[in-house]
Image: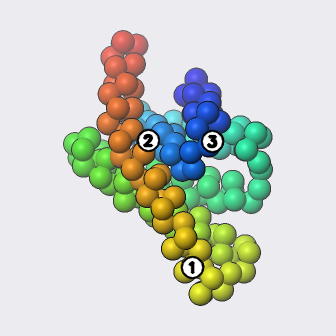
Amino acid sequence: MLSAICVALRLVLVDFPNVKPVTAIFLAIAVLWSLGDSLLVMLVTMLVSAIWLGMSVIVVAQIGVYALLITIFWALARMWAVHWQALFAFLLCFVYGFGLDVFSGLIYGFGKAGLVAYWLAGLPFDLAHALSTAVCLPVVTLILREIEKRAR
C-alpha cells in the first residue's frame, strides 16, 4: 500500500521537480518500523514509477543512493526528536542530489569542471527536495504513528 501511495505521489507531483514527499515516507518508515520495510517500499516505488516516468541507468543510481541514505538515516536519526530528524533529512537530500550528480557525471563523462557545473545547476532542485522532505517528514511520521497505533 505504501509503495502504491508513493508511486501515485511521484506521478501526481511530476510537474513539480524534486518536490516529492516520498523521501519523507521512506525515512519515516525506516525510523518507525524497520530498515528492511523502508528499503522494500523504496525499491518497489522506484521500479514501478520508472515504468511511467522512464527507466534508465539513473533509476539504478537513485535506488543505490536512496538505499545508502535511508540506511544512514536509520542508523543515526532514531535517537533524535522529529524536528532534528527533519533537519538531518534536509541535509541528506543534498547528499542524495550530489550522489546522483556524481553518478551522472561518471556515466556521461562530464569531467571535473562539467561535474561541478552540473552540481551547481542542480542545487535549486536539491533545495526543493530538501525543503519538501523536511516539511513532510513530521507530518508523515505522525500519520504512520497513528496508523500503527490503530493497527494495534
Q: Nearer the viewer, residue 106 or 123?
A: 123
Q: Amino acid at mark 1?
A: Ala
Is 70 located above or below residue 151 in the figure?
below
- x, y percent for residue 88: 32, 54
- Residue where numbered disc 2 is placed: 24
Q: Residue at x 57, y 79 (%)?
A: 117
Quarter of the image where the C terminus is located: top left
Q: Amino acid at mark 3?
A: Val
- x, y percent for residue 76: 32, 53
Q: Compare marks 3 and 1 and give the one earlier in the sequence.
A: 3
Residue neighbourhood size for the residue with mark 2, other residues' Cα within 10 Å, grouped as few (<14), some (14–19), many (≥20): many
Q: Nearer the viewer, residue 72 or 143?
A: 143
Q: Amino acid at mark 2?
A: Ala
Give the structural element (helix, strand or loop) at label 3.
loop
Give the structural element (helix, strand or loop) at label 2.
helix
Quarter of the image where the N terminus is located: top right
Snapshot quadrant of residue 148: top left
Q: Nearer the viewer, residue 1 or 98?
A: 98
Q: Residue at x 74, y 75 (%)?
A: 108
Q: Compare marks 2 and 1 and give the one earlier in the sequence.
A: 2
Q: Are dots 2 and 1 in contact, CB under 8 Å?
A: no
- Residue where numbered disc 1 is placed: 117
